[in-house]
Image (cartoon, rainbow, N blue to C red):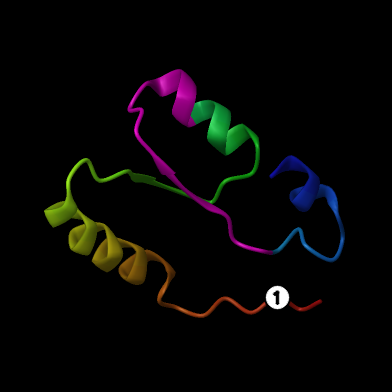
Amino acid sequence: MRQLKVHERFRCILLGVLNSSREDRDLKAAYDLGVNSDIEKPMGFNQCSEVAEQIERQWGVRNPCPH
């Protein structure tokens, strides 16, 4: 992730992670690497559709990269 964010062509790409940890240090580490969004990883099959809806809400707006 860090390499993408420092590369001129790719730095505007939005990065999201599915994360099973809610520890502040883990979330901070992800954002320090250049993550734009952190979504809690679903623990069961039924939660997968909820996560898909959350991803669509967060990333549904097109954010074009000028490169």
Give the image location of residue 45, x and y in percent.
17, 53
Q: Which picture quadrant has residue 30?
A: top right
Name the residue: 31% across, 69% down: 57
Give residue 22's position: percent from left, percent from top. Answer: 33, 27
Query: What is the magenta range?
Result: 13-27
* Residue highlighted by disc 1: 65
**Which residue is depicted at the point 76% across and 52% down?**
4
- The image position of residue 18, as x and y in percent, is 41, 46
Q: Is residue 46 above or below residue 1?
A: below
Q: Is residue 46 left or right of residue 51?
A: left
Furthest residue to the left?
46
Q: Where's the C terminus, which quadrant? A: bottom right
Q: Amino acid at mark 1?
A: Cys
Residue 1 quadrant: top right
Of the pair 42 and 57, the residue shown nearer to us: 42
The number of discs equals 1
Left or right of 56 on screen, residue 67: right
Residue appearing at x 53%, y 51% in the figure:
36
In the rendered image of this protein, does residue 34 appear above or below residue 46?
above
Assess whether residue 55 is covered by the magenta stretch: no
| Residue visible at 17% across and 45% down in the picture | 44
**Please, is residue 27 above or below residue 13 in the view?**
above
Residue count near mark 1 (Cα–Cα under 10 Å), binned few <14, some 14–19, many ≥20: few
x, y percent for residue 3: 80, 45
Task: Indicate the secondary structure of the residue bearing disc 1.
Answer: loop
Is-magenta flag for residue 19? yes
Q: Residue furthest right?
A: 8
